[in-house]
Image (cartoon, rainbow, N blue to C red):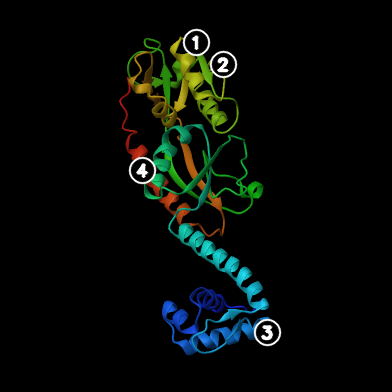
Amino acid sequence: MTDVDLRHLAAMVAIAEEGSFGRAAARLGYTQSTVSQQIAALERVVGGLVFDRPGGPKPVRLTPLGRVVLDHGRELLAKAVAFGEAVDRFNAGRGRIDIGTFQSVSNVILPSLVRRLRDEHPGCDIRLSEEEPDQPQIGDLDLLFYDGRIDPRISGGLEHLKLLDDPYLLVAAPGAFPEGPVSLERLDGAPMLAWPLNCDQPRVEQAIARSGARPQMVFRTAVNDTLLSMVRVGMGSAILPWLVILGGDVLSDTRLRVHELRPRIPPREIYLHWRAGRTHSPLACRALEIAVEVASEVASEVAYEVA
């Protein structure tokens, strides 16, 4: 039955509903001879007559074989319509997209990205997952945000795009340091709050150590809001990237002060990754474009007002 043509089934349905080859031809926009040829071709495939043709004004009638073919033919046509609609939705950007993210991006970049995608494609299906392992696996994700480049030997062949540099700043309670930039040497012996020793944190602490400073690490947590809460109550200061400061609305918080560091610690780099050689869906292509636009807007805000 692999030779059944959907056009032939559509002709059969039209004849069954109209009662004649002529009316079916008018409904379909064909000539009557074309409809007759389509039914003849269908009958050759199924191996028997699907209509009894009494002639004259009498309507054509389905044969027993015709009733079987018509029932299943209608199911096939309905599936074909659903298939076409699904492809049209996909090509219009209303499919599904799976995005991997992490805390800072979730708070600052993703809200704008998701809003714009939904505004442009109200029917799209966006799935997000947030993990911060040392070496993330892209798996079946369409796109993956990560603060650094991922080793392709661990996650398989990947392509990537750098979105922005995310500079480090010092967040402290008011009066903990003089106004203006703070030298790394001033952190020697100072109580500090920090992330656990994964992702980019070791590089930050190595930069501090190279300055000769040895801060007193009093608390580590991967939760940015908790770090900021502990700074607010005076437990210590924290060196955090701009995305965390922006996402935590730190600059408008009178209980916190933001200082530049001297010398500057090399910025954290935010990348977007995807499986090498993967053909993006229209929705994933647009998500990537929006991510670049939002990252550019965020980078322009790094002209921050610091104490």
Residue 106: where, in percent of width, then height? 47, 35
Residue 219 is tagged as 2
Amino acid under disc 2: Phe
Mark 1 = which residue? 235
Mark 4 = which residue? 296
Q: Are marks 2 and 4 in contact (CB under 8 Å)?
A: no
Residue 5: where, in percent of width, then height? 58, 78
Mark 3 = which residue? 48
Secondary structure found at label 3? loop
Q: Are marks 4 and 1 in contact (CB under 8 Å)?
A: no
- Can you tell which of label 1 and label 3 is closer to the viewer? 3
Amino acid under disc 4: Ser
Asked if 91 appears above or below 99 in the picture, the reply is below
Counting other residues with Cα less than 10 Å from the Cα at mark 3, is it few (<14), some (14-19), or many (20 or more)? few
Residue 243: where, in percent of width, then height? 42, 32
Identify the residue shown where x is 44% and y is 87%. 31
Cα–Cα gap, marks 3 and 4? 67 Å
Cα–Cα gap, marks 4 and 1? 34 Å
Cα–Cα gap, marks 1 and 2? 9 Å
Asked if 14 appears above or below 269 in the picture, the reply is below
Q: Is residue 261 left or right of residue 148?
A: left
Nearest to the observer: residue 123 or residue 107: 123
Q: Are marks 1 and 2 in contact (CB under 8 Å)?
A: yes
Nearest to the observer: residue 167 or residue 75: 75
Secondary structure found at label 4? helix
Cα–Cα gap, marks 2 and 4? 33 Å
> Which label's residue is closer to the chain start, 1 or 3?
3
Res. 1 in view: no
